[in-house]
Image: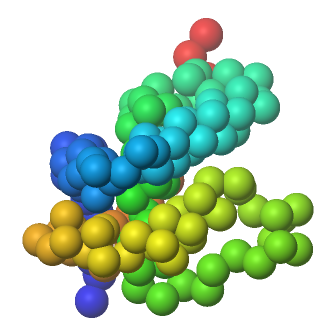
């Protein structure tokens, strides 16, 4: 069965709930994760000639970062293998923070996401968020 893609509005709502998992903690790891994901997304968009010309209908870098943040946390909650030390050289750094959040604050996250469909979060498709590449507008 194909899972329906989450809307940007639903992704934002899931992230806003995730922030509450750290409300009484000295450090809001959800906000840190968002900042890491946004840096990674901006780095990805900046490597080529002009991301915006090829993806004119793309969700914003911030919204894509939110999507990656909630997707990663959902993936680890659903049992994806946590990264190990040697993975540091091969995967985005935000994966480590997301895994650490789940490892240490799983109960808190499950409380704030009690009404969130983890499978829909885990199924977020980046390509649908940025749209199919088109010929650049000149």
The C terminus is located in which quarter? top right
Q: Residue at x 11, y 71 (%)?
A: 115
Location of the N terminus by quadrant is bottom left
Residue at x-position 29% and y-position 58%: 21
**Residue 128 x, y percent position in the rendering:** 41, 53
Q: Nearer the viewer, residue 25 or 138?
A: 25
Give the percent coordinates (x, y) of residue 111.
Answer: 19, 72
Q: How many numbered marks, from 0 up?
A: 0
13 to 58, vertically: above or below: below
The correct choice, above or below, for 129 with respect to 82 in the image is: above
48 and 101: which is toward the camera: 101
In the drawing, does residue 113 fall left or right of residue 126? left
| Residue 90 shown left or right of residue 127 in the figure | right
The residue depicted at 53 percent of the width and 63 percent of the height is: 98
Could you tell whether 102 is left or right of 20 in the image? right
| Image coords of residue 10 (percent x, y) | 20, 52
């Amino acid at each position: 069965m194909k899972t329906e893609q989450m809307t940007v509005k639903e992704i934002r709502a899931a992230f806003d709930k995730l922030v509450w998992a750290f409300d009484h903690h000295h450090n809001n790891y959800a906000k840190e994760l968002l900042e890491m994901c946004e840096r990674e997304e901006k780095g990805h968009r900046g490597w080529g000639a002009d991301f915006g010309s090829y993806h004119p209908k793309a969700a914003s870098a911030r919204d894509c970062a939110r999507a990656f943040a909630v997707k990663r946390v959902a993936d680890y909650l659903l049992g994806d293998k946590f990264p190990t030390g040697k993975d540091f050289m091969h995967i985005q750094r935000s994966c480590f923070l997301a895994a650490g959040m789940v490892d240490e604050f799983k109960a808190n996250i499950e409380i704030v996401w009690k009404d969130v469909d983890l499978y829909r979060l885990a199924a977020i498709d980046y390509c649908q968020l940025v749209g199919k590449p088109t010929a650049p507008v000149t």
